[in-house]
Amino acid sequence: MHESTEQNWPEGRIVDRLPVIVYASELGENGRWRYISPQVEEILGFTPEEFLADPGLWARLVHPDDRLRALAVESRDALGNRDTRPVEYRMYTKEGRVVWMLDEAVLEADAHGIPVWHGVLYDISERKTAEIDLQRSLAQQAVVARLGERALKNGDPEALMRDAVNLIGELDGVEFACIWEVGRDGRRLNLRAGLDDTALASGRRVSAGRESHAGAALDSGVPIIVGDWSEDERFSMPPAVRALGATSSLAVIIDGKDRPFGVLDVHSAEPRRFDPKDVPFLEASANVLADAFERHAADRALRHRVLHDALTGLPNRLSFVDSLDDALGRASVSGSPVGILFLDLDHFKLINDSLGHHAGDALLRAVAPRLRAHLRPGDIVARFGGDEFGILIDRLADDAEAVAIAERVAAAFAQPFSMQGVDHFVNASIGIAVARLASGQSTNAELLIRDADAAMYRAKESGRNRTVLFDAEMRATAARRLETERELRGAIDRDELELRYQPIVNLRTGEVTGLEALVRWRHRERGLLDPADFVGVAEDSGLIEPIGRWVQERAARQILEWHELRPDDRPLDVAVNLSARQVAHRGLAANVAEILARTGLDPVHLRLEITETVLVEESASAIASLEALNELGVRLVLDDFGTGYSSLAYLNRYPFHALKIDRSFVDTLGVEQEGTAIVEAVIGMARALSLDVIAEGIENDVQLAELRRLECDYGQGHLFHEALRPEEISRMIAAGSLDYGPVPAGPASADAARITSRPQRSRKVE
């Protein structure tokens, strides 16, 4: 017979007062309990009598997930083995709580040979909870770290959101995670990542208000925990969450710099799976997402600024080149022609000068949508800068289609543009270039743009308001320009540049008061080249700046040498031309000041000549440069006066000391009454403004006599002498023959005969 089921151990023994459960039970899942200490009621809620009366109670209280492991030791193999390993498992209390127990026992046979477990059950819930919390924390930290690494490696929000819900969903007890984005109207949260599309149906949105747990987290900015959806009366359960069997949830806000992005939430099938200890982890994950989204938005905004024009919102030249490179890459495979249009507004500077820059900006903003409206879907229009636009026309059939599109674009300007309440008609000159690539061929986007640019300039030269297709002739011209640019880059280093000097004569006294320095290029194969052969190339390539500095310094040193040859005479002035690019350069005045300091030339003897067309093109930046030069003390001369627009405005706006009458007006003196009247008016105006007047291109005694009659101050031209080499000027100074003596008022005098008896030289570019 087995012993009684009653507790037959003496009461009050020390074992009954230990904070553990001491027990003795027979072997097996339903083995009879012979003894269990009173602490069982404190720990599990059941009395010793209940255990003794129900042999299967213990097995039923063991957590289902741990039962097999706990019962695995219930074997006679352990009989007499005092090294039996302790077993940890979970048990349910009478109230339904889960506690962790450490079961440490030995199996011994009693006096009748029946195996009996003699053991101790320790309540290790606090330790296990701490261990589980630590493991959970470590797992959560690992998820945040991995998410941060992926955020740094890949800034794509879509990929990052997928990674986030997948990583978080791998955590123990987390069935799935979701990322919800605030809708544009702020009333809905739209699912961006998480859940299975096949199980969602129409459940991809939840309310952004407090009736949803996610909306409450968004609205309050604090985490929302739902311990058990079946008991929670605060929120309506999202259909998708219900469909996937979630029992508990936790939601936190994904904040942003200017506005929240949305909500990150996690769901579990376990009741009360989430508690405040899980909040820091989910908030850290949300912060990683928020930072990544902000970086992506900032990168996208920066890229947009880098690749788009701020005024019109159109892609800029950099973006256009990228798109053109892509199109050319596709064309090298498909063989389809790729075309571009280079468009420039005609007389755009007149709008700026007459109505102001704000009107010019308004015009450019109005041009952009009109151009887009006249293009095919997929064609790209970009603003290159100023009033220049580029248009990419991909997938062309032939040149004729490109021309047809260009003409359609030109028609966009048939209707006027309204500015300041007044309609203004604006035209455009368009250059077309088409690349036809055989399979495997390639070309450079910049070269194609340069071809279209050249065609656009041909359209300008042909009268504006027209389209021109880049052809073989222009290609040959462009090739020559490229070759010229390549050779010009080493011209200074190879000492191939030279200066010629043309005397500037006081028309009242015949005294040479100064000389204009004119650059020449002694090409190794083509001989001596005039500026017309290379200055345009130098302008376009930027080489004009180093060439200009070389001219200024060489001329300054040369004029100082001539000062030493005639120490008792008034020092000669030297005039040097400034190009448009030089005038636009912010460092112009500093460069000139450095040259003056290095050479020792008094700035009053340096005259810098600026053409009126330069001021038309560079009026915004030119005034600062010219005022700075004036502060240095150099003399400023307005060259080619009368050939540009709004000349009187420039005389008032800029600090000029003299102006030059263009040779085209001098040619008509004594021949055309209108031309003579213009020169007379210019000289009279200069007198009123206290400006000196220089006439260039004087070639005969009739022109000289008229200029003397009109009391023009200075003149230069082949009548006196062509541009001379420095050594020729030096010989004339040494011989005392640099000056021309008194200049008569009319051609009938002997002195006039002396001057005009000089051999006439052919006209050439000076």
Image (cartoon, grey):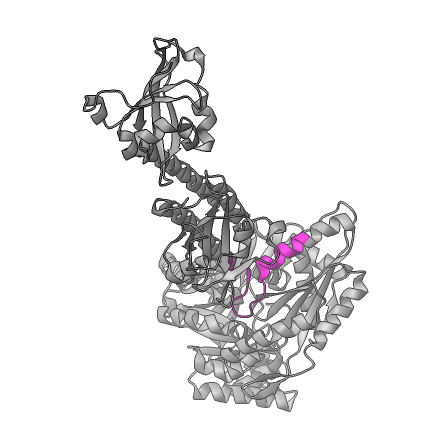
Front in this rendered view, residue 319 or 31: 31
Residue at 53 percent of width and 52 percent of height: 242
* Image x and y of residue 186, in percent: 48, 66
Q: In which quarter of the image is the C terminus?
A: bottom right
Which quarter of the picture shows residue 452? Answer: bottom right
Relative height, residue 508 to residue 608 (above, below): below
Locate residue 669 relative to residue 709 in the image: left or right: right
Which quarter of the picture shows residue 397? Answer: bottom right
Relative height, residue 180 to residue 702 (above, below): above
Residue 315 among magenta residues? yes
Q: Which residue appears farthest toward the front when viewing the image?
A: 1
Residue at 81 percent of width and 61 percent of height: 398
Front in this rendered view, residue 616 or 148: 148
Residue 566 among magenta residues? no
* Image x and y of residue 9, in percent: 25, 20
Relative height, residue 499 to residue 739 (above, below): above
Secondary structure mostly seen in the magenta stretch: helix
Locate residue 115 relative to residue 701 in the image: left or right: left
**Number of numbered discs visible in the structure rendering:** 0
Task: Report the magenta residues as a range.
Answer: 300-326
* Image x and y of residue 608, in percent: 46, 69
Front in this rendered view, residue 143 or 563: 143
Q: Quadrant of the N terminus?
A: top left
- Mark yes or no: residue 350 visible: yes
Front in this rendered view, residue 173 or 673: 173
Residue at 36 percent of width and 17 percent of height: 117
* Image x and y of residue 383, in percent: 59, 66
Locate residue 104 relative to residue 661 in the image: left or right: left
